[in-house]
Amino acid sequence: MASVDAGTLRRMSDALFIEKGLRSAGSTRFWGLLVLASVIASAGVVGDSTATVIGAMIVAPLMTPILGSALALVLADRSQVVRCVLLVLGGALAVVAVGMLLGWIAAPPDSFASNSQVTSRISPRLIDLLAALATGTVGAFALVRADISDTLPGVAIAISLVPPLAVTGLLLTVGRYHDAGESTLLFATNVAAIVATGTVVFLVFGVRAVAQESGFAVGRFRGGSLAAVVGLMILIAVPLTTGTITVARDRSLAADARPVAEKWAATGKWQIASVEGRNGVVVIGVLGLPPQPAPTALRAALDRNGMRDADLELHLVGGRTHWCPADTDTCTVRDSAIG
């Protein structure tokens, strides 16, 4: 594997290490683009617009300090590691805050229960980690190789950084705390993958040796740094494995519940808009005109078909939500989705 040269290393450090001072060109660019990307992502999620969310991914600058953390780790530059980590954490909190602000302004009656942008970011799995590892590798490789740097916009789209945080902020405003945690986990997964793959790519390309020869400040690279990165990956993989199992179980639950729900809805000439399994809860969306079929009848039908242990969350037209707990024959009406 060919090593980088001093010019490439200088270009990388200039691109990834944001200058100190809030009024510096790098800082104003970072925070300005981050706030704008947060607004775009939050608006895209609220409007359930994939195109708008993709626009936020392209604008978002969070990948810069994340890859900067990887380069700083390889150079063993503690001050830059701390600065990059603080920028990532501060940036993440800023995105969540913007999401919460827009959530207070524009939260829908169903608390984003039927929003595809939210749904796609609250069930992180191992496959998301694998995708993030591949994408992070491409991003680091594109930085090392100037001749393929035109792939970076595609990397920005592939790696989801700002949208999950916007989803976290939006969900916090409607009390869906568990799902907010899941979207935060997706963000953490992508961050961990970028740092891990960036560290490996920079080491493989001999960044440390070039830095030492070129007069860069290079500290002692300890095995503990790699161990910390590996430990972070393992720490992330555990809940993702659990999430993978949960998603498989929820899909099976939704498949079993759909025919039961369709038979129930047919009694009142209603239509089943959606059937999901969500952390062991059957979530069903129903469309139709009054009178509505009795939610308790659906609860009883699910019990008869082996789903006695699953709670039922029934969303009816107009935003009303019926909550029918497992092992009961009663349902209560709630104004918003269950968190």
Image (tube, helix red, strand yellow):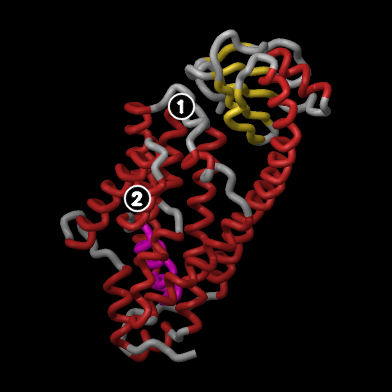
Badge 2: residue crowd in 10 Å (few <14, some 14–19, many ≥20) = many
Q: Of residues 144 and 153, which is closer to you in this image?
A: 153
Residue 122 lies left or right of residue 247; in this view the side is left
Image x and y of residue 89, in percent: 39, 51
Please determine whether, in this image, residue 102 is positioned above or below residue 159.
above
* Sequence order check, earlier mark of 2 and 1: 2
Q: Is residue 64 magenta?
A: yes
SS type, badge 1: loop
Q: Is residue 110 above or below residue 169?
A: above
Does the magenta run of residues contain 97?
A: no
Number of numbered discs overlaid on the protein picture: 2
Task: Tell me what residue is drawn at x 42 percent, y 34 percent.
Answer: 170
Residue 313 to residue 224: above or below: above
Q: Which residue is mark 2?
A: 91
Q: Residue at x 48, y 67 (%)?
A: 136
Magenta residues span: 62-77
Q: Position of residue 61 (x, y in %)?
A: 32, 58
Q: What x and y, as percent, mark residue 147? A: 35, 82
**Residue 302 appears in which quarter of the rendering?**
top right
Neighbourhood count class around disc 1 (C-alpha, 10 Å): few under 14, some 14–19, many 20 upward:
many
Disc 2/disc 1 C-alpha distance (Å): 22 Å
Look at label 1 and name its amino acid: Val
- Report the side of 116 relative to 259 (left or right): left
- Residue 10: quadrant of the picture: bottom left
Residue depicted at 45% across the width and 78% down the height = 202
Q: Amino acid at mark 2?
A: Gly
